[in-house]
Image: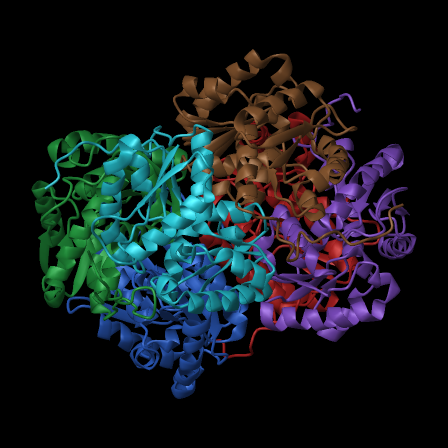
Chain colours: A cyan, B green, C blue, D red, E purple, F brown
Amino acid sequence: MRLHVINPNTSDDMTASIGQIAIAHVSGETEVLTTCPAHGPASIESYYDEYLAIPHVLAEVQRTEATTDGYVLACWGDPGLDAVREITAKPVVGIAEASMFAASAIAPRWSVITTLRRSHHMVEAIVKKTGLIERCASIRCVDLPVLACEADPDAVLSELAHMGKLALTEDGAEAIILGCAGMGGMADSLSAQLSAPCVDPVAAGVRFAEMLVNLNLQTSKWLTYRSPEHKTFR
Amino acid sequence: MRLHVINPNTSDDMTASIGQIAIAHVSGETEVLTTCPAHGPASIESYYDEYLAIPHVLAEVQRTEATTDGYVLACWGDPGLDAVREITAKPVVGIAEASMFAASAIAPRWSVITTLRRSHHMVEAIVKKTGLIERCASIRCVDLPVLACEADPDAVLSELAHMGKLALTEDGAEAIILGCAGMGGMADSLSAQLSAPCVDPVAAGVRFAEMLVNLNLQTSKWLTYRSPEHKTFR
Amino acid sequence: MRLHVINPNTSDDMTASIGQIAIAHVSGETEVLTTCPAHGPASIESYYDEYLAIPHVLAEVQRTEATTDGYVLACWGDPGLDAVREITAKPVVGIAEASMFAASAIAPRWSVITTLRRSHHMVEAIVKKTGLIERCASIRCVDLPVLACEADPDAVLSELAHMGKLALTEDGAEAIILGCAGMGGMADSLSAQLSAPCVDPVAAGVRFAEMLVNLNLQTSKWLTYRSPEHKTFR
Amino acid sequence: MRLHVINPNTSDDMTASIGQIAIAHVSGETEVLTTCPAHGPASIESYYDEYLAIPHVLAEVQRTEATTDGYVLACWGDPGLDAVREITAKPVVGIAEASMFAASAIAPRWSVITTLRRSHHMVEAIVKKTGLIERCASIRCVDLPVLACEADPDAVLSELAHMGKLALTEDGAEAIILGCAGMGGMADSLSAQLSAPCVDPVAAGVRFAEMLVNLNLQTSKWLTYRSPEHKTFR
Amino acid sequence: MRLHVINPNTSDDMTASIGQIAIAHVSGETEVLTTCPAHGPASIESYYDEYLAIPHVLAEVQRTEATTDGYVLACWGDPGLDAVREITAKPVVGIAEASMFAASAIAPRWSVITTLRRSHHMVEAIVKKTGLIERCASIRCVDLPVLACEADPDAVLSELAHMGKLALTEDGAEAIILGCAGMGGMADSLSAQLSAPCVDPVAAGVRFAEMLVNLNLQTSKWLTYRSPEHKTFR
Amino acid sequence: MRLHVINPNTSDDMTASIGQIAIAHVSGETEVLTTCPAHGPASIESYYDEYLAIPHVLAEVQRTEATTDGYVLACWGDPGLDAVREITAKPVVGIAEASMFAASAIAPRWSVITTLRRSHHMVEAIVKKTGLIERCASIRCVDLPVLACEADPDAVLSELAHMGKLALTEDGAEAIILGCAGMGGMADSLSAQLSAPCVDPVAAGVRFAEMLVNLNLQTSKWLTYRSPEHKTFR
């Protein structure tokens, strides 16, 4: 099996980190390709960033579609997920939905902790779209930028511990989802500090993609995710 | 007041039609600029089309931001609406939300009739995002492509009448929203055939944008719609 | 165009204030008639007040129906709105729904600040009925009576600023709706204090009514809002 | 115990019928007073009718408050229920909510069958307000006026059987609620025809009122249902 | 009428207390049998306890079915309620649902106060299942075990008063539901302390069961609650 | 890794079938133990069956807890899932939730097709509890008993094809979930007939359990799923 993990932003450091986590978590037989698009923003923190990144994510998928068995979008906004499902039948996993599914199987309710406060609304939109808002105890933010995960991971981890404790003691969460691909690799340490399970979204993403490939499940082409109509592009 | 109506697709015919409807419905003092992006798909029918169109919509907004008082996104998917609200404080109206607000003031429940069946999910997503799914009796589709609105308007109108009647008699709708900018101009005829009010989304969009400008209401920059962070774009 | 703005309570001072705001916000060609019913309570703060006021609001509508193009109910409880839509086909706007529509176009979530705490439930009922409870971050109360808006506007404005700040910093609101017609005229000052947009419900109401009239949209008579059956009244 | 059953409309025939059902269903020690207001519409089928009836319902309550232990509003719209709860602390039962509670204890989902199709929206509003919309399989209408229950009960019963069967076989209902006080007395016959339980709303209303009185539960005066503020009525 | 009140746990003290409350609240003609199962846990505080208790509750029902007119399950988890409705047509009342119905008729929103914090999720599940989550202001816990209600009622009552006050002042509750059968008998004292109505679930349960029996309403056997299929039990 | 798959009913044939599917779908290194309880009903079709089965499922878990890395409950009602999560920290997967997660990643909406019509309510309850009711297009039933899956698989498959087609063409489903462990093994054939993906719940269950074990995620013991309190069992 060959998975293609796409970091939708163009940070090479974060791409490398995501690649390491991905490889560390797949099973032995799985080959992992981790890339980022050739163009686009260095991080995704606003709707503006997201929409500028998506066309290049789509190009990455088209570039590798013939040789890939499954895709993982390694950004907690699952950017362009619906469109990727249109241009390939291979299973496509967003790390947001994968981490929510994993968390939902180990806790009645969970909280997502993401980066900047401005992204709260984007995160809430993903949770609602996935359909799991009733399982979400709260969304909290460390209020540090995405790239701080690479530049100052100690500060991020410290704030994660602070916000995670509040989520568990005040919001009704019983597990924590790390709401940014850049937080990949911090789950074990955080879990030990909080005495509650923490879900690494990149790890959950690659494992869930493996599961779909192994189950031989491909994206439904019944209606919504049919191939896009051929048309003029100016 | 100067409104910029952006047709997110690159069909010149549809842009011209939208411009005519927009001008016909604004008040005398309002100046209307109607354009489409320089690049992008000729119509928006899939998530793929939508995501490829949005960066060019954003560029259109940036091009005219200094001289515009309000924006109207003239596609019933409100493509890129959240991002446009980030890059300008001027009020930004999606024709989907404007037509839902208008319909909600004249009927307890309404139906949206859109083009291809594959777009059903996209339309439902907009209704949910706006928060008005309880007011939505149903989403029906004429199952003709967007550009048929220009190429074969009689066929579209005929199917609108058919589906509108089903919405009113079977689904519990009491008004109809035309769920495509290309259907602009068909509301009066359809309303007469159905004996129920039909909302033209382009007309509703420009009137609602005028309202916001006249009320001196600008997009909140409190948190979610702050200007995007400056960052490296590769 | 001739709009009839009805203040459902019988306070002449508040009626005059509402009339001033209404006239200040409509466009040049629009004629505005602002009245209050001949009978009824001086303010509406309980369900009891509301139900005693509504028959007289209905009488006001019947009195002017032949010469009016659209109605605005200038009380944030939208009292009798459904019944008014039954007895005229002219568009009828409640200032509650109009201000929620306006706020929903400039902020992801908003809070309503109303007068007495006892009215919290009535306000929540309107938000739910309109279908926008997901967009409502919170309902807060200045805990001053309706008529304090006329008698002691400084106290009301001061409490609005206090509650508005809490809504923005603690509840997730990004815009504020003034939840009482008597607060009309306080939006600009409050917005400046809070650095977030505040929606004047009376201004939003008349502008939204103008929009519906200009769009030539009348209340659907398909089913729910048909004319009431003729019957014996004892 | 002394219950006051108020028929909100001014039909003497219906008042008499309601009184008979009420007396037949209370326990031996309970005294029942059944009246209708001195003024108001002969039946309630529109919001207009409802709002004209409510002030007179309130007057009925005020007239008997000193000598009554509990109230039953005998119309499936529960007209003025919130206001009645403000002007007395005695328990007040709407027959709509009482019949929904009873049905919810004997079936996973139930349908309400009411009179005119135009009342569908009013019935749905009550179900939502009570909070039980998830338990409601459907709302169906016999499409006969309220007073047909007195004038032509056979026709009403026949249509009830027709609609009840559809609710059970097509909508997922497993019990039927008679959605009009005028249908009181038809439950046993209908239940026999349908082989499924049918809830008589008047009977449920008086029994539920007895229950509240026996439990010594009075309306909470904590906030929403406090006595209305004293104020000028013009 | 003969009611069988089943305490699902095997605490004889609690069974006796429940029996006293039940007898004190039924009307004169009603005969009450209060028992607990022959086997099972001494209290129900976890899902594990609940599932071990249910088969023995079912056996209790089967033992008395021929001579009973209605059942009351006297545990605020309504354990096994759906299964009991399958094995008898006699009305079956869970004290959770009965107390929610009663509270919903006297207050817009109410809070449930239960025992251990771990049971929060179980209580929330019952409220959601009943369909009344919108009416529920909060769920709070005294964080004392179920059997403390018998062993140390003063401590329980003191914590109820503390949590009840928080529910009323911070959560938006206007009435309190005692969320444990063991709290039966504490409602009057708590209500006096809080100046807000408190619902005794055992009292509400037996009165609601009487109501259903008097209304001659039996559990629907249309589909979900049909008798279980005969099959091999190993 | 050692997974224990528990068939909650006592049908040896079904246990064998489930075991075959489980072994066929896990990866090479995973060891699978498939058992059914020593006691209990031969199939689970009612709440009664379910509640009688659960204590024996719990005993199975306790019997093997020391030597098992993860559990799979192989019945589409996820019977006793919450209690199993209390008595072990090892991840516990219900095949219902696992198959819903898988389906949600390949289709916007899906339908569940289960066995007897009476189980419709049980299936809906699981979907709601998991939080995914918005993703569920419909629940349909082949109306054949559970054991028909073993005794007459052709009849079951034929009805699955019939109901699956209706789900796809009338209900808005774009994928099908086989809503009974006994239907395991029919997914490929059904998928080929329907031209839409079908999810085998047993296969999804074991793969999802593997994923959780590989991610080193254990059930949260923060609050709800703590070990049950020690107490007297009579």
Q: Locate residue A75 relative to residue D77 in the image: left or right.
A: left
| Viewer-closest of D57 and B177 | B177
Q: Quadrant of residue D213?
A: bottom right
Asked whether residue D177 appears in the rendered view, the answer is: yes
| Viewer-closest of E139 and C151 | E139
Q: Quadrant of residue C1?
A: bottom left
In percent of width and height, residue B218 lies at 25, 68
In percent of width and height, residue C217 lies at 25, 51
Q: Locate residue C58 relative to residue D41 in the image: left or right.
A: left
Relative to C145, say whether B192 is above or below: above
Relative to A38, say whether A2 is above or below: above
In percent of width and height, residue A106 lies at 58, 48
The outermost residue toward the front is A28
Q: Quadrant of the N terminus of chain D?
A: bottom right
| Residue at the (71%, 41%) spot, across then down | F65
Q: Locate residue C151 relative to residue F227 in the image: left or right.
A: left
| Residue at the (61%, 44%) spot, across then down | F91
Asked whether residue D144 appears in the rendered view, the answer is: no
In percent of width and height, residue A230 lies at 18, 31
| Viewer-closest of D149 and A10 | A10
